[in-house]
Image (spheres, rainbow, N blue to C red):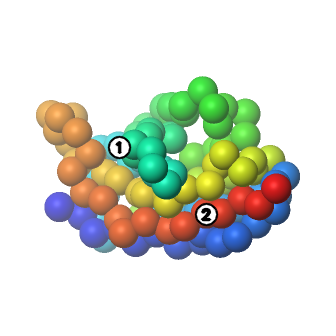
Amino acid sequence: QVQLVESGGRLVQAGDSLRLSCAASGSSYVMGWFRQAPGKEREFVASIFWRGVGTYYTDSVKGRFTISKDNAKNTVYLQMNSLKPEDTAVYYCAAKLSPSSASFGSWGQGTQVTVSS
């Protein structure tokens, strides 16, 4: 298990930018961001390999969101630009610890992002 702590969520206006951070207690295989809006299922947003290259995004955020990492700081970021009201959700950081892991096994507590129109 790795401990994850998200930060950076707040109330912003549509069109604004926001950067979320996820501080991890150790390294992992893949780090991801997920989000859950009120009354909806949690959905995948983006992921990045902890070592090497490779990023993935859900279609609705491609071109607007960028996931990045600072291995020295054990921190993953989610840069969110051109925010829309439909981006409003609790954003969760998650870690998949090894290639054999079936799913993301470690989760943070979440950070609220609210985008007003």
Nearer the observer: mark 1 or 2; the answer is 2
Residue furthest out toward the front: 39
| Precedes in sequence: disc 1 or disc 2 | 1
**Residue 116's disc number:** none
Q: Which residue is mark 2?
A: 113
Instruction: Write the residue at 54% across / 31% down.
Output: 58
Residue labelled with disc 1: 30
Say which residue appears at 73% left-offset and 40% top-offset. 64
Residue 28 placement (x, y as % from top left): 29, 52
Relative image position of residue 105 (x, y in whole percent): 21, 51
Residue 32 percent location from the top left of the image: 42, 46
Q: Is residue 86 left or right of residue 48?
A: right
Residue drawn at (35%, 43%) of the image: 30
Amino acid marked by disc 1: Val
Relative to 38, 5 lies left or right: left
Q: Residues within 10 Å of mark 2 (few under 14, many from 20)?
A: many
Name the residue type under label 2: Val
Q: Nearer the viewer, residue 97 or 87?
A: 87
Q: Quadrant of the N terminus?
A: bottom left
